[in-house]
Image (cartoon, coloured by chain):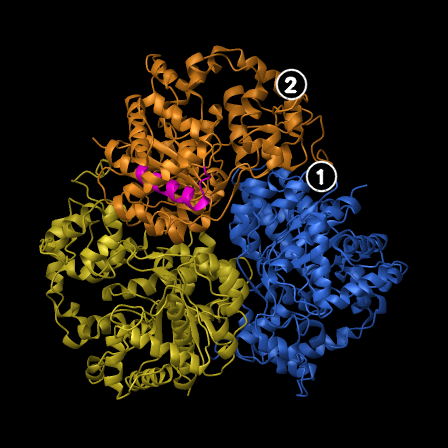
Chain colours: A yellow, B blue, C orange
Amino acid sequence: MPRSALTPADQLPTLALHPDRALPADPGVRSIARELLATTQDLPLVSMHGHVDADLLLDDEPFTDPASLLVTPDHYLLRLLVSQGVDLDSLGVPRNDDEAVETDPREIWRTVASHWHVLRGTPTRFWLEHELVDLFGITLRPSAHTADVTFDQMVAALATPELRPRALFERFGLEILATTDDATATLDSHARLADAGLSGRVIPTFRPDALLHPLTPGWGERVERLGELTGTTISTSTTFVEALARRRAEFVARGALATDHGLATPWAEQLPDDAADRLMAAALRSAAGGPALGSAGARALAGHLLFEMARLSCDDGLVMQLHPGVLRDYDARVAALRGPDVGYDIPVVTEFVHGLRPILEAFGHHPRFRLVVFTVDEDTYSRELAPLAGVYPALRLGAPWWFLDTPDAMRRFREAVTDTAGFYNTTGFVDDTRAFCSIPARHDLARRIDAGFLARLVAEHRLDLDEAHETAVDLAYRLPLSSYARPS
Amino acid sequence: MPRSALTPADQLPTLALHPDRALPADPGVRSIARELLATTQDLPLVSMHGHVDADLLLDDEPFTDPASLLVTPDHYLLRLLVSQGVDLDSLGVPRNDDEAVETDPREIWRTVASHWHVLRGTPTRFWLEHELVDLFGITLRPSAHTADVTFDQMVAALATPELRPRALFERFGLEILATTDDATATLDSHARLADAGLSGRVIPTFRPDALLHPLTPGWGERVERLGELTGTTISTSTTFVEALARRRAEFVARGALATDHGLATPWAEQLPDDAADRLMAAALRSAAGGPALGSAGARALAGHLLFEMARLSCDDGLVMQLHPGVLRDYDARVAALRGPDVGYDIPVVTEFVHGLRPILEAFGHHPRFRLVVFTVDEDTYSRELAPLAGVYPALRLGAPWWFLDTPDAMRRFREAVTDTAGFYNTTGFVDDTRAFCSIPARHDLARRIDAGFLARLVAEHRLDLDEAHETAVDLAYRLPLSSYARPS
Amino acid sequence: MPRSALTPADQLPTLALHPDRALPADPGVRSIARELLATTQDLPLVSMHGHVDADLLLDDEPFTDPASLLVTPDHYLLRLLVSQGVDLDSLGVPRNDDEAVETDPREIWRTVASHWHVLRGTPTRFWLEHELVDLFGITLRPSAHTADVTFDQMVAALATPELRPRALFERFGLEILATTDDATATLDSHARLADAGLSGRVIPTFRPDALLHPLTPGWGERVERLGELTGTTISTSTTFVEALARRRAEFVARGALATDHGLATPWAEQLPDDAADRLMAAALRSAAGGPALGSAGARALAGHLLFEMARLSCDDGLVMQLHPGVLRDYDARVAALRGPDVGYDIPVVTEFVHGLRPILEAFGHHPRFRLVVFTVDEDTYSRELAPLAGVYPALRLGAPWWFLDTPDAMRRFREAVTDTAGFYNTTGFVDDTRAFCSIPARHDLARRIDAGFLARLVAEHRLDLDEAHETAVDLAYRLPLSSYARPS
């Protein structure tokens, strides 16, 4: 397909951020949306969930090059390029074998720029444009023609102190940045960052996924490591949960506000203590080379441990986050060659009503329990999630996540959820990225979509303007804070 | 969250019903929608399904207070308040134990008013505003500041004859009001209401749920009661169905036009007569303390009885309504403390294609059979329900129900269903409420949404204006009447 | 319902195609959409999938009458009329018994015209209006009043040479027309059509459904016929696949670009060769009256054969199309009386993630493999299909199909898919009809909806206008061509 038919090289298309981008097209609605956006646009960023490495801010080294900053860590972008036949090798994604991959950032950027049309209509494009303009002052649309000039401009900008991680942290207005940390992480970086003089907080999040399912490879070693870290002899479910509670306490001491659980299926089950203890003992024997634990036993133990995590949350006040329903490493060949998290994670049908029932019945009214649920299965919004969140005080719906963290899907979320759950059973915007520089763009997009949704309600006389202003601020700032506030 | 930041007490926000509320924002579309709404706004109300108590109209006592009128019977409102941590005790919902609950209507209204922001963007808010303005002349937005003054105003209004039940019945313009009645109900109130001189009809609806599933607690006693009421010795499926047919005939004699079936799963199965008879006998023995009926047998018998209900509809012409796919009393603790219907009903995935096949194959073309299906699983609209309703003459799709009886969900219903089923395989608007005073608001909202949808089709030149006018009247008035008309 | 209340006979409503039909209502968006539509409106038609009979063009006989042209082959129209109680007999649909059906085209058209209101808001109406105006110059809206005059006008038009099949082929601007052909079809008509001097190509499509599931009635005979046609002794899976490969080569020689698979479930499985061979031998014995093949074995063999079809596609470059998720001949009584394809096909829940995994893992990155997936289960768009197409280079999403080939469903498709998969992992528009004369109307509607969607992105500053122009042309013309191009 001749991509340049309408774009001769002597008249290169420009790049700019329109002040009305992603606002509704209708002039009346847009005018209200603009007004609402003006209220939220300069609010601090509350980033309650993400995958930025705390060391990035601790070390505060300059970013080395545009490719490792913008391309390699952005799996949204990588997937779209792969889908059009671009090989991951040519994008510099490492392999487990001895074959070489592209290492020249300029070549990688040329590949991206020459495939810019693939991104049309996607949030990836929206976020990247935001970064290109806002951080690097790029004024030309990326293309094969402009790859080199835009690359040079980015390289020059990256050499300036303004683009070092801590400077960006301040510039972004981050009030809180939550990282996601393995349950056995030392949290040293967080400890040292606390004294680094950042104007906002960087806090850890307790993610025990690798410990909570006994059939995960390496599970036995991880349990052993947890025992060492906490000075616990783990031989039963009871002692295991005690060790987890100790680890959680250390996260709390480092400022953590939440746990996070990535699961195939959101499914909990309360076993009697002795049954759980026996299952855990069997799982440990299985991990040590003894008789294999069957899948039914593994599932029951995992369900019980998830239930116990909810119980611990009532004790220590850590907000429980669920990110379920994704089949990880879908393509075994890609996962084998490139390692985990590259192998094409794909959503599957997710069921919440039966799976969460034990937790909601036991703790759904507990004054110290807060459960935040995310989904990539939007079919559950009006049928399951809004009715549950619209009745259980402990439950809040997280922002549209991953494949749904997009302009139209965010709008659909509000349309499907608000009728039954209102605004105040949602958490407001929660981003989720390992691409540090994209955080402001993601908040900006969410604020625009929420402004547009609220503006439509105002224009349709379903909400008064003063209420819309207040709600816009709540969604952008106050609800993320209050949804993740630990009870006193 | 400081709710009053933008609303100082000396400048209280007002409350009014904007004439364009819930109409589309686009000025061109809105102008057409206004015109269509003008055609339907004053049509009589046809209320073919609901849970108003016939005694309310028979007794015609003044409503005692605003809380028992507007709060306690509105489970939409109760759920939203609970979801934000308000206790059902403080809303006056009775308990099964000896603990006290709030009994002061003023205190209950204060709680509601001070949580008004929770309702933003919900249909509950839309309906309540309609009632507050239209029935009580309230002109201030409910809030902690205005709770007392609005309460006093409502109390004063309730003392007037204009707000007594029969006066409201006339004022609402109710042409028909269908109640929902247990299959063993006496219908005495309906008999007496027929002579009460109301300008519209109040008719019963035959709801045999408690009789149709043999594992329902108390099933045996109910079957016995049915036998007594109809003078039938019930020992087999055949005699059971005969007794049901006799009861249905009594409902028909009292003006009933329909049956109603609330089921977990819309699943029918035609068993051979002798197999059904044996199952029924086994179920009766089980209910009498004999060997327990297994769940497979119970399911088969329930499937067969649903099929038989369809067959009886071909005989007596009662329209068969299905309201499936809701898990009742989800929270066992709440249900135990407060009784049924308070325990947080939650929708689940619903499958219609296989489940309704026996009924549709047998009776889907029967000239005297009419099946009206409702759902709270909107994922089935374009995949299952519209294709089925778009081919079977007996099948019509009921209006969006419960969690989907909302502005945006009603719009999505039309968008998902009309392409394949058109307008004339839907029933038009059917409300479903135990909150008598909210009936006009619900019809008003539906007429607005349908006007907006039709107006968009006209603006997009997909429908002519004269056709839109006719269709608007059909959806608001003629289709509910004709969909529920018993064949002559 | 008095249909004529607003349409007195002396002032008959007119029929015309508004130039802005199906474009967005917002004036600003519409103005951009108009501009985009102007770019695509006169592009040639690329019709990569359909069910037109090649003999229609080979014989080039005049169409006999309006009913057999517009009514009998249009199952969308038939279904909607049946759903409102019109009997298929009165529409001239043949029966398997000796009973007569209506044979007078005028009577059939009268029935259609008098039910015109049933079609309000449906794409069937949109397409028919397009044909009535564009082919026949009708200027009155069909109704009981206008049935005869419009019928006469159509009869007169059909007598002209301009309305003969080949003349229409040229007039429609068909660059390619793909038919769908049984795997054992001779393709003689295609061979002769190649010399017929049409300005566009008519190509076959290889559809082996009846061969790929061993429990299909008549399967054994079909396998035997395949063996004869290809000179193969089919006794194992290996020899069966060899025969299929030979047949595919003959389709390729006749210009075929694709295969097509209509399946209940999109489910593939790679068996070891010897296991597959044994299953195939067992299936052949079963078909010959030997021990019955179980359903598990049949499913495994069908899954394996689907996998093998993908493998063959890598060899011969035929694009693999899947049309899954429809329960064929839902109503056994109707199917028995009228034959297949009349019995009310109904969509069911469809799962792609697990079912396609073997094919995607094996061939998803193969440079010569192209898989095009269609669905009638739109719940899978954002959850399954867009994430899969947004990463696998071999996979493209076909256009919204059947019950989703409608104005609002096409818009929902773009809204749900573009965020994650962009535009360039979709095929652009692919029609699917046996109603030859409706092809231009279908492309016209799709171009309008895509213009409207792109225009909204432009109006919301999410896409530049020059890009929208290019994308509009891609979706209407270049992507169907390139998606179905056989690799060189």
Residue C303 in the magenta stretch? The answer is yes
The kind of residue on which mark 1 rests is: His
Label placed on residue B366: 1
Residue C365 position, x and y percent, is 23, 45
Residue A345 pos. (x, y %) = 31, 57
Apparent side of residue C424 relative to residue C62 in the rendered image (left or right): left
Q: Quadrant of residue C322?
A: top left
Q: Is residue A246 left or right of residue A315?
A: left
Q: Which residues are magenta?
A: C291-309
Q: Quadrant of residue B183?
A: bottom right
Q: Which residue is mark 2?
A: C103
Question: How far across and how far down the image is residue C73, in percent?
Answer: 54, 26
C480 and A145: which is toward the camera = C480
From where the camera sits, is residue B244 visible? yes
Residue in view at x 65 percent, y 45 percent: B359
Residue type, numbered disc 2: Thr
Residue closer to the observer: B329 or A466:
B329
Separation of disc 1 and disc 2 at Cα? 25 Å
Q: Are marks 1 and 2 in contact (CB under 8 Å)?
A: no
User: How far from the left and from the top, in percent, is residue B187?
Assistant: 84, 62
